[in-house]
Amino acid sequence: MIKLTVVVDNSVPISAKKPFLGEHGLSLLLEMDSRKLLLDAGQSAIVVHNLSLLGVHPLQLDAIAISHGHYDHTGGLPHILRHRRKPIPIYAHTQIFSERYSVSGEGREHIGIPFTKEESISLGAEWQLNNNPVEIAPNLWFSGSMPRTTAFEKGDTKLVVCDKTGCDCQDEIPDDTALYYASDKGLVVISGCSHSGLVNTLNRGFEITGQTRLAGWIGGTHLGPVSPNQQEISLATLAQYSPDFVAANHCTGFEMMAELRACFGKKFIPAFVGTVIEF
């Protein structure tokens, strides 16, 4: 059994009973038995503020997993490390420190990790960089690399990476990862952004865990910024699995969250800050 609490998200519900703060970012707290694990760290010190309101000090964390190397999932990490003053294992992909940007009519903006690997190590980060699946807790898997097997999941064309010639090429985000939990009721996907594509992410989870049923999905889907074709096929595929719940947030976007609500009804959970899900 895992108790998952949304620590950082873009939105804080009006009904929140504590003065949580929101920002464009994501952080999820997983509690199982006596262990506490954090997936992602938001983009600022808000992660420490919200953890405090939840009664959790960074020293109580046993491990951290980082889904991919974007600022809104990593920027809060130095704040966590400074409050710990004690080393902690951090699971991530080997290419997480790639230099990456977002392009728009206003130019190019750096959106990669806002600190160096060396700076984080000096604060206590013990990087466990893997491209292969790792069981980081009983029945809880870090995905490693995501095979891109679908033809329709083209990703976000506004995200670019610099190649050796200096050219801006679409960033395939090879360091995109997720967590998978093999529950008694089936696979639970715990996602940062699913830049690999929602269906690719699902397929990887079934492959790693050996599960055949989807119990639930939690986290970002990145359906908001992708093409209508990718949105439509992804939603249809997700619906075919008839999950018990879909708890989407962050990069999903309000329009796609409305589509998910229409598709899944009460099984859809808007996973804003403070939301608690047990599975």
Image: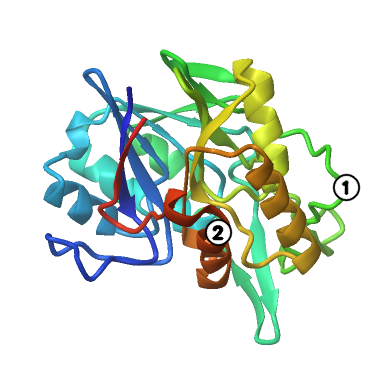
Which quadrant: the C terminus?
top left
Q: Residue visible at 61% across and 47% down?
A: 194
Q: CA distance from mark 2 to mark 1?
A: 22 Å
**Which of 15/204 is in front?**
15
**Which of 165/170 is in front?**
170
Colour convention of the picture: rainbow
Residue 98, how many percent across, how many down? 65, 48
**Which of 45/234 is in front?**
234
Q: Is residue 13 above or below residue 266?
A: below
Q: Amino acid at mark 2?
A: Leu
Give left or right: position of 125 versus 215: left
Q: Are marks 2 and 1 in contact (CB under 8 Å)?
A: no
Residue 45, how many percent across, how many down? 27, 57
Q: Residues within 10 Å of mark 1 (few under 14, many from 20)?
A: few
Number of numbered discs: 2
Residue position for label 2: 260
Q: Residue visible at 71% across and 60% down?
A: 231
Q: Residues within 10 Å of mark 2 (few under 14, many from 20)?
A: many
N-terminal of the pair, mark 2 or mark 1, is: 1
Q: Residue visible at 16% across and 39% down?
A: 56
Q: Amino acid at mark 1?
A: Ala
Give left or right: position of 82 versus 78: left
Residue 263, how many percent across, how many down? 58, 57
Give the foreground label among 2 and 1: 2
Give left or right: position of 200 versus 154: left
Q: Residue visible at 42% across and 59% down?
A: 25
Return the mark for residue 151. 1
